[in-house]
């Protein structure tokens, strides 16, 4: 989405409806600074107020996201372009999430590795060794549910039997045996178990 184009369009529609930035902001219960950011292309309206904004500006959501009033002739083409754009944005977001999962996993694993090395190699009383190793395990155990949540929602799992791609519930991901991001789960489509790979894009 072209934020600058959308911002100019919001400014045009606001002026066409004889509203100042402050008046528009008051109608939406936000600050005029937020409206200014939209119109300067620095940010986009939050989805929670998008419908209300469009109603005030007398435009459709499709118009808003296009940065122009969409005619009937261009409606289908415009909708398809927006859909493709949303898919691409999701793929980018999923890739960033999976990269963040790796980074967070490494950061959680470092304290465990350091504490394990110290606890097992430095001569000390057994109870002190246990405390040091345990203090390294706690950050790792705390991070695991967070890392699994990222893996669950980012991208899709692909069934090896029927090639169905889907986002599973959290529990099957948590309980499934795995090798890296490949998990042994039951496909909701063909109901068969297989080692299912994580894929970012949906075919």
Image (tube, rainbow, N blue to C red):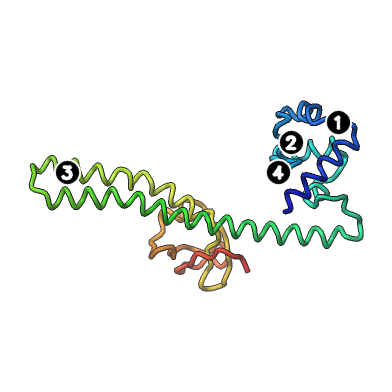
User: Neighbour class for label 3 at 10 Å: few (<14), some, many (≥20)?
Assistant: some
Residue 131 is situated, as x and y percent measured from the top left of the image, at 19, 40
Q: Earlier in the sequence, mark 1 or mark 3?
A: 1
Residue 123 spot, x, y in % from top left: 8, 47
Disc with the residue nearer the chain's start (4 vs 1)? 1
Q: Residue at x 8, y 42 (%)?
A: 125
Q: Which residue is mark 4?
A: 44
Position of residue 51 measured from the top left corner of the image (x, y, whole percent): 78, 39
**Label 3 to label 2, Cα distance in Å?**
57 Å
Measure how far apart labels 2 and 1 are at the Cα level.
13 Å
**Cα–Cα gap, marks 3 and 4:** 51 Å
In front: 176, or 129? 129
Q: Residues within 10 Å of mark 4 (few under 14, many from 20)?
A: many
Q: Write down the residue under mark 3.
A: 130
User: What's the distance in space between the residues labelled 4 and 2, CA to CA?
Assistant: 11 Å
Q: Which residue carries the number 2 mark?
A: 36
For this rendering, which residue is in front, 23 or 62?
Answer: 23
Report the residue marked by disc 1. Answer: 19
Describe residue 115's horizontal placement relative to residue 32 as left or right.
left
The quarter of the picture where the N terminus appears is: bottom right
The structure residue drawn at horizontal position 38% and vertical position 53%, both measured from the top left corner, is: 105
Question: For residue 57, which quarter of the picture?
Answer: top right
Q: Left or right? Give the position of 135 relative to 87.
A: left
Disc 2 versus disc 1: nearer the observer = 2
Q: Name the front one of labels 3 and 2.
A: 2
């Amino acid at each position: 989405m072209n934020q600058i184009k959308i911002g100019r369009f919001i400014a045009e529609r606001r002026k066409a409806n004889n509203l100042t930035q402050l008046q528009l902001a008051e109608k939406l219960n936000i600050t005029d600074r937020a409206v200014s950011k939209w119109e300067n292309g620095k940010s986009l309206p939050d989805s929670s107020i998008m419908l209300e904004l469009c109603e005030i500006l007398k435009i459709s959501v499709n118009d808003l996201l296009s940065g122009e009033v969409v005619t009937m002739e261009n409606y289908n083409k415009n909708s398809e372009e927006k859909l493709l754009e949303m898919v691409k944005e999701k793929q980018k977001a999923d890739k960033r999430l999976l990269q963040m999962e790796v980074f967070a996993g490494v950061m959680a694993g470092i304290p465990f590795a350091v504490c394990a090395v110290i606890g097992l190699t430095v001569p000390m009383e057994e109870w002190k060794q246990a405390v040091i190793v345990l203090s390294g395990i706690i950050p790792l155990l705390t991070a695991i549910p967070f890392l699994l949540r990222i893996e669950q929602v980012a991208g899709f799992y692909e069934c090896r039997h029927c090639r169905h791609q889907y986002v599973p519930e959290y529990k099957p991901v948590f309980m499934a045996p795995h090798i890296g991001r490949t998990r042994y789960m039951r496909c909701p489509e063909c109901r068969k178990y297989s080692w299912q790979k994580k894929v970012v894009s949906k075919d």
